[in-house]
Amino acid sequence: MLFRIPKITLWRIIIAVIVTLGIYYTVIRYTRGLGAVTNLSDKFPWGLWVGFDVITGVGLAAGAFIIALAVYIFRIDTYRPILRPAILTGFLGYSLVAVGLLYDLGKWFDVWHPIVFWNPHSVMFEVAWCVMLYLSVLALEFSTVVFERLRLNFLKQAIHLLIIPLSILGVILSTLHQSSLGSLFLIVPSKLYELWYSPYLPLFFFVSAVSVGFAMVTMESFLSQRFLGKGIELNLLNGLARVNVLVMAFYLTIKILDLANRGVLGAVLSLRFESVMFDIETMVQVIIPLLLLLIPAVRTSARGLFITSLFIVIGFIMNRLDIAITGVEASSGTSYFPAFGEIAISVFLVTMGFLAFAFAATYLNVFVHVQKKEETPVEIIHDV
Amino acid sequence: MVAIMVAITIVGFVVLDLVIQAVRGKRARQEQQVRLDFSDFRVPVNTFFHPGHTWVSILSNGEVRVGLDDFARKVIGDIEAVEIPGRGKTLKQGEKAFTVKAGNKKLSFISPVDGEVTGINNLMLANPVQAARSAYSSGWILILKPTNLAANLKVMKIAEDAVEWLRAEIRRFREFALGENLHSVNDELQYEVGRTSQDGGCLTEGMLGRMDEKAVKYFEEAFLGNKA
C-alpha cells in the first residue's frame, strides 16, 4: 500500500499545533482536574467552556432546525440543496456541545444523572433533556446520508418514513432549549448587568439563534467553497439574507422596547465597560448587518453575504459571552480571563468540528444529493 | 474581555486565510490558467438546449426561463456584465436576445424561443461573476412568455440528445481552439487561435478571452449562431 505524505500547508501546520495542544491539555484536564487547566473558581464557575462551547455552540448550530423546518414542514424545496450541510453542521455542533460539557463538568462521569435523577423544576434539567433528544433527532436525520453511503436502503427508507415527525420534534425541541438557555440567566437578576438582564431573555435567545442560524448556513457554504471546492447556491443564500433582515429588525425592535420598558435605555450611553461591550455587540450583531443587508448590491454579492454573516456570527458570540461572562463579572467580586489551557481546548474542539465536517463532506453525499437527482453529467470524453 | 478575545481570534483566522488566498491566487495566476475539467459539464434533465448555447426551462406558469449554458460560460470565463432587454420587449427565436461582457470581449446570444420578456435576473445584473457560475440555477438571464413554444422546441435538445450534442460541441470547440478546422475561415486565424491552446490542446477556463477579435467573431457565428 502506498503512503503519501500530505502536502504541508500553513493551515495544516496550524491544525497540527492546535490538535497537539488540545490533546495535551485534555490529558492534563482528565488526570489533574479542572484547576490544573482553567482559571475557574467557586466565585466564577462558568467560564469559556460553558459560555462559548455550550451556550454559544447551541445557538450556532440553529441552522439545522431552521432549514429542516423550511424543507420538511413548509415544503420549500428550494432550500433542499443546503439541507444536508445544515443538518451536518447542527449534528456536529451539538456533538461538540456534549463533548464541551464533558470537559466542563467536574464530575464528568456523572453526566448521565439527568436521565435517571429527574429534577423537573430545573431549567438545566430541561436543557439537558432537550439537547440529548435533539442530538438524537439530528443523528437520525443525518443517518440517511450514512445509510445511503453504506447502501442500506431499507434503513434509509425507514428513517424517511419518520422524517416529518422527527422534524416536528426537532423544531419543538430547538425552540424549547434555545430559549431555555436564556432562562438559565433569569435566576440572576441582581448579578447580570442591567442591559443584558431581561425577563424576555428566553425570547431574545430564541430570536437571535434564528438569525445566527441563517448566518451560519451562509458561512458554512462559503467555507465549503473555500476549503472543499463545493459550489455556492447564491440565490438561496440571498433568500436567507432577505428573511434574516426581518428577523434582525424584529430582534432590534424588541430589544429597544425592552430596554425602554425597563427604564435602562440611558445605560447604553454610559461609558461603563459593560455598556460599551453591549453597544459593540449590538452594532456588530444587528445594526451593521441590518444596514448592510438593506443594500441590494451587498445582498446579492458573495463577498457582501460573507462579510454580513461574519458580523452576525461574531456579534452573536459576543452577545452570549457577554451574558455568560462579562455581565456577571462585576457582581461576582472577581475577574476572569480563561487560562491558556481553556482557550487551547476550545479552539481544539472547534477545529475537530471543522475536520469532522470536511471528512463527512468528502466521504458522504452531503453536497451533491440534489444535483445528482436532477442532472446528468456529461461523461469525460477520452478522445477530447 | 473574553468576548473581545474570541472575536479577535475569529477575525485573526479570517484575515490569515484572506492573506493565504491572496498569495495563492497571485501565484496561481502567475503559474497557470485553470484547466477545464470536462466532467464538470452538466446537463440538467429537465432543460432544453438551443444550438446557440442557451437553455430553456419551462416554469409551472407556462413561462420559460432562459440562460446561457455551462459550456458557453466556461469557455467565456467570468462574466463581468450582462445587457438584458427590458420587460415587455418581444424576442424572436434566432434573434439577438442578450449580451455578456468578459474582459474586453462582448458576445451576443440569440433567443431560443419567441416571446415577450416578463422577468430579468437582478442577481446577474448585480453580481454576474458569482451568479453565472451556477449556469442552470442562479445564472438564468431572463424569463419569457412564449408565443410559439411547440414549434420553437423542435430545434432544441433535451436529456440524452442534449448530452450527445454537448459532447459534439466540446469536440468541435477543441478543434476550433486547436485551429484544426478553420481552413474555411483563413490561415491567419488558424495560426492565431491554434496558438492560444495550451498543454497539447487541453481547454482552459476563459480561453475565449485570450483569443483575438477574429476568433471571437468566428466563435459567435459558429457556436452561438449569431450572424449579425
Image (tube, coloured by chain):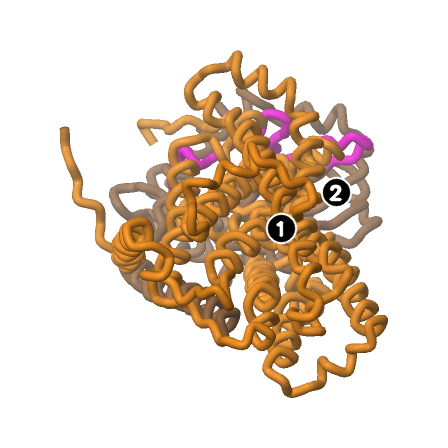
How packed mark 2 is, by other alpha carbons closer than 10 Å (few <14, some 14-19, many 20 or more), is many
Query: In brown, which chain?
Result: B
Please state the extent of the stretch shown in magenta in the rendering: B37-64
Q: Which residue lies under the disc numbered 2?
A: B143
Quadrant assignment, res B127? bottom right
**Residue B69 among magenta residues:** no
Q: Is residue A50 left or right of residue B207?
A: right
Q: Is residue A294 visible?
A: yes
Magenta-drawn stretch contains B40 = yes
Density class for disc 1 (Cα within 10 Å; few <14, some 14-19, many ≥20) is many
Q: Which residue sits furthest top?
A: A154
Image coordinates for residue A320, horizontal then vertical, percent: 59, 62
**Residue B14 in the image, given as x and y percentages of width and height:** 44, 64
- Look at the image and tell me whether residue B136 can be seen: no
Colour for chain A in the figure:
orange
Instruction: Inspect the image, locate mark 1, and give the three-letter code of the amino acid beneath it.
Output: Gly
Q: Residue at x 42, y 20 (%)?
A: A150
Label 1, on which residue?
Answer: A213
| 2 and 1 marks in contact (CB < 8 Å) | no
Q: Find the distance from the CA under tag 2 to the CA under tag 1.
A: 32 Å
Tell me the subunit letter for badge 1.
Answer: A
Which x, y percent locates residue A16? Answer: 26, 54
In the displayed structure image, the side of residue A228 where residue A373 appears, left or right? right
Q: Is residue B84 left or right of residue B100?
A: right
Q: Position of residue B101 (x, y in %)?
A: 56, 58
Residue at left offset 56%, top offset 44%: B134
Query: For the residue marked with disc 2, what is the amino acid?
Result: Ile
Q: Secondary structure at mark 1?
A: helix
Image vertical order of residue B30 relative to residue B162, above or below: below
Chain identifier of the residue bearing label 2 in the image? B
